[in-house]
Image (cartoon, coloured by chain):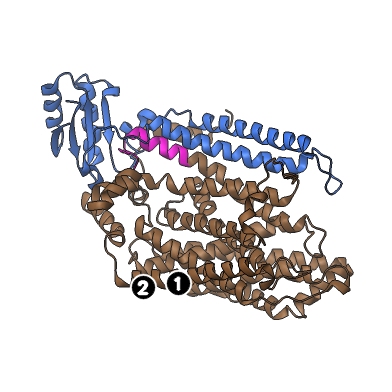
Amino acid sequence: MTLQEEQKINADLLRPLQRTSVWFYLLVGVLGTIVLCGAGAWMYQMWNGIAVAGIKWPIFWAFYITNFVFWIGISHAGTLISAILRLVNATWRRPVTRCAEVITVFSLMIGAMFPIIHLGRPWLFFWLIPYPSERQIWPNLRSPLAWDFFAISTYLTGSSLFLLLPIIPDFALMRDQMTGWRKKVYRVLALGWQGTTKQWHRLEAAMQVMAIAIVPVAISVHTIVSFDFSMSPVPMWHSTVFGPYFVAGAIFSGIAGLIIAMAILRKVLHLEEYLHPVHFQNLGKLLLMMSLLWGYFTFVERITTWYGNSSAEMAVFWETELGSYSPLFWTMVFCNFVIPFPLLAIKKLRTITGCVIASSTIVVGMWLERFLIVVPSLGTKFLPYSWSFYRPQPVEIMITISTFAAMVLLYTLFSKAVPIISIWELKVGGHGRPQLMPAQQEEEERTLWRVRP
Amino acid sequence: MNAIYGLYSDPNSAQNAVDELRKAGVADRAITVVASQPYEEYEFSHRYQQTWIFWIAAGGGVLGLGIGLALAYITEVFWPIVTGGMPIVAWWPNVIIMFELTMLGAILATVLSLFITTGLPTVESRVYDAEVSNGKILVAVEKPKNVAMIEATLRDTNVDTIKRN
């Protein structure tokens, strides 16, 4: 890569940080207003009590817990995919990783807020934290809700560090390229980064270790979220398939979210030279695989219930397939499988537009899937006298809409402060394959074919 | 003067400069290479390949495991509550707490060791040139003893600029 090419990359990726159009302020204004409306709705709920939400006996988990599971699922787009691609040394990952990792951090933050929003008295949220106290509320580490606390906080810490460490060299670059107050801010954020060979090597080694550590953590997080349901003897919750079903669903919705974010960034920030159709093609293939896996898990879950023919489970089964929730169920099947499958399987249709359409339907479908896991089982439990139906109230709808706006707002503000594509990683992608000396080549091949240690 | 350095437009020239400085008798530890990206495929990047970071991460993991085990065991024993017919100290659920804290320990140890070994964060002035962010590679000799000889050596390589810090 020549100096001119490197400087072009700097200029292209720093341009969105240096120039601000009126559309940016307009977007921030609109999104900020929606977020404020959501905050207002939450205040209203706090003031008047949780009864203003549609949750009532026996359906105490509804929109808020659906959103909690959905956003934690979306978080699986970033760090997990980025870590896997880093470990397998997939070179095409370089422009994609930061876009993805940002999704993880923000969606985890939003997801983790929902158990607090769900509380009647949210200012006492710290009672959820399992620490010994004199309130006679025993910390119960055998509860899946306590596991959630540990899993989500570990994942959020790990993902934030996984995102922030590779940004330090880019902060150093911005320290040199920016002027005025920005230069001062980036100087502080760069932490005194020089770029010595030692620093680069340690950073790469640390990222490798973190990639190894973050993969099992990501898988554990959604498995533990699934335990919130599967550890309860509730019809169609108490299932061994829930762990992998939730993990697959999380990765599925996460990739869909990532594709949508990448397409918007590509268009708005003019990143066509860096986010190529091949990135969408590759992620589209991954999405196709996850769509098939989701179809497989849904079939397995359904046929096991149907074959078992337990009356309580069959009540939920028919309620979702042919009863009150059936429009949502079949919309979910269409959104997650019927529409995306041809769009992603047929090469001619797997264009950027095709991938974005498929991803958009998948995001809708996966939200419905979470809703259909949470609500119908609670509304159709063992004894018919307790059966009930759930209707979301304006407060819940407003808070839900505002979290989507919050996600876009946070993403917009982040991409205004930090290059959304890792500049140094992109440049490394331009290096050729290392030229090995004949002796090194021989050693490499000997190691490859070695039978015994 | 803390350092004398040359700026290079390409990594091959930087590698050549490092080789020439070595030939001129400059010790490896006195030579610093600064770049805006890692050049793992060049020999000058290989000096720091030995690292304890993996073992430090493992150590952090073991520490996290110990904390997780102690937290779960001590909490359950000191605040006993019977739930779902489970024993007071229930190992199956405790494995989850122990696993999460093991991973958290490994991650935090990794980040901590990165900061300690690279000397970050710092406000101390180190050898650096803003041209590095434009793609130049800086090859410096810190605390040089024979400035004239080093300048001559750098000048014989494909150097763009020679500066003193």
Q: Residues within 10 Å of mark 2 (few under 14, many from 20)?
A: few
- A272 relative to A443, above or below: below
Q: Can residue A163 be spotted in the picture?
A: yes
The chain that hosts pointer 1 is A
Q: Which chain is brown?
A: A
Is A115 a magenta residue? Answer: no
- Secondary element under disc 2, as helix, strand or loop, is helix
| Residue type (three-letter) at the residue carrying disc 1 | Thr
- A101 relative to A131, above or below: below
Q: Which residue: 83% across, 74% down?
A: A387
Is A191 a magenta residue? Answer: yes
Q: Position of residue A252 (x, y in %)?
A: 59, 63
Q: Nearer the viewer, residue A202 or A160?
A: A160
Location of residue B41 by image quarter = top left
Q: Position of residue B120 (x, y in %)?
A: 37, 35
Q: Which residue: 64% across, 61% down?
A: A69
- In the image, which residues are magenta? A190-207
Q: Which chain is blue?
A: B
The chain that hosts pointer 2 is A
- Residue A101 lies left or right of residue A380; in this view the side is left
Q: Position of residue B114 (x, y in %)?
A: 44, 34
Q: Which residue: 52% across, 30% down?
A: B56
Q: Nearer the viewer, residue A195 or B16?
A: A195
Q: Residues within 10 Å of mark 1 (few under 14, many from 20)?
A: some
Q: Which residue lies under the disc numbered 1?
A: A33
Q: Which residue lies under the disc numbered 2?
A: A26
Q: Can residue A432 be spotted in the picture?
A: no
Q: Nearer the viewer, residue A313 or A192?
A: A192
The main secondary structure of the magenta stretch is helix
